[in-house]
Image: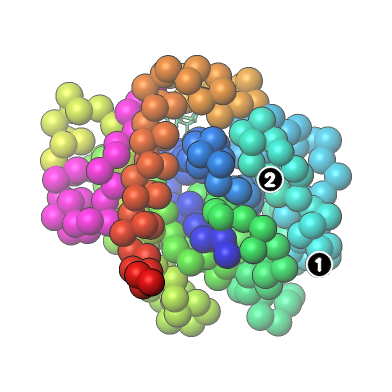
Amino acid sequence: MARVIAVANQKGGVGKTTTCVNLAASLAATRRRVLVIDLDPQGNATMGSGVDKYEVEHTAYDLLVDEVPAEQVIIKDTNGKYDLISANGDVTAAEIKLMEFFARELRLRNALEPIKDQYDFIFIDCPPALNMLTVNAMGAADSVLVPMQCEYYALEGLTALIDTISKLAAVVNPDLGIEGILRTMYDPRNRLANDVSDQLKQHFGDKVYRTVIPRNVRLAEAPSFGSPAIYYDKSSAGAKAYLALAGEMLRRAERSEPETEQA
Ligand SMILES: Nc1ncnc2c1ncn2[C@@H]1O[C@H](COP(=O)(O)OP(=O)(O)OP(=O)(O)O)[C@@H](O)[C@H]1O
Ligand SMILES: [Mg+2]
């Protein structure tokens, strides 16, 4: 059964999409079966996976609003060697249409139920807002992965996000937890970044990934080639960092699994 992870932060431009695409590709490269769901009308994860958002037959809109089965909406084997549910401007309308439905927070969860056992990981790329799309992502997820830049106001934003996660957990998804907090675009020479990083570790302890994602131009260039960084420049610091993050996630998952009984 897939572990469903919403990649969310209401702040824009913190590296949500970059994390989704590159972490998914890194896990797929270790032979995990991975699905990425683009839930952002900007369609950046779609384009970054080498899929033209203007040419797609189905998007997350069809899944959320028209109840087209996930099987039909999934685009198989993108440039990142993972499957994709795409997004484009149509998904903006889904955000509004969702309001009309009963149990609207759980539309995505219900839509994914039939295909969950076909994957090891499902990543949901959220828009930079705490709107009904993000709520649906959190309704469907086991946990939330929070990418953040170590800047002055970052901790304030994080507190607001965690507050939302716990409120949502209470109402729609009692099992929702924090998967981890990821420091992105990190510059170790920046003193403020180091200070914020220390505070993060104090507040959130083990939830902060040991792996940090450095600022790396290859990560910013790769989407224009419709490719995750490991297939654009696998020796780049950015590609290596996301491979390391995938390794850290897998090790964490192994540790938290219950011990199997010895025969
Ligand atoms: N580690 C990095 N090094 C250099 N550039 C990066 C890095 N991570 C992301 N970027 C670039 O920063 C910009 C924002 O990143 P990204 O699109 O992943 O953020 P986002 O949180 O998904 O944004 P939005 O909130 O708009 O969806 C992009 O141009 C991306 O290529
Ligand atoms: Mg994005």
**Residue located at (68% from left, 45% from top):** 83
Ligand 2 neighbours mark 1 (CB distance < 8 Å): no
Tag shown at residue 67: 1
Q: Are marks 1 and 2 in contact (CB under 8 Å)?
A: no
Task: Place residue 198 in its image quadrant.
Answer: top left
Residue 210 painted magenta: yes
Q: Give the SS element for disc 1.
A: loop
Instruction: Please report the residue visible at 79 percent of the width from the left and 57 percent of the height from the top.
Output: 71
Q: What residue type is labelled 2?
A: Leu
Tell me the kind of residue under disc 1.
Glu
Residue 251 x %, y %: 34, 50
Question: Which dot, 1 or 2, sits closer to the camera?
Answer: 2
Dot 1 or dot 2, earlier in sequence: 1
Q: Residues within 10 Å of mark 2 (few under 14, many from 20)?
A: many
Q: From the top left corner, tell me how far across and down residue 257 is, in percent.
A: 37, 65
Question: With respect to residue 172, does 119 lie above or below?
Answer: above
Mark number for residue 94?
none
**Could you tell me if residue 157 is visible in this image?**
no
Give the image location of residue 183, x and y in percent.
Answer: 31, 41
**In the rendered view, how is the structure colored?**
rainbow
Foreground pick, 95 / 39: 39
Query: Magenta span has 121?
Result: no
Q: What residue is shown with label 2? A: 84
Q: Give the range drawn in magenta.
A: 196-216
SS class, disc 2: strand
Q: Does the residue labelled 2 lie within 8 Å of ligand 2?
A: no
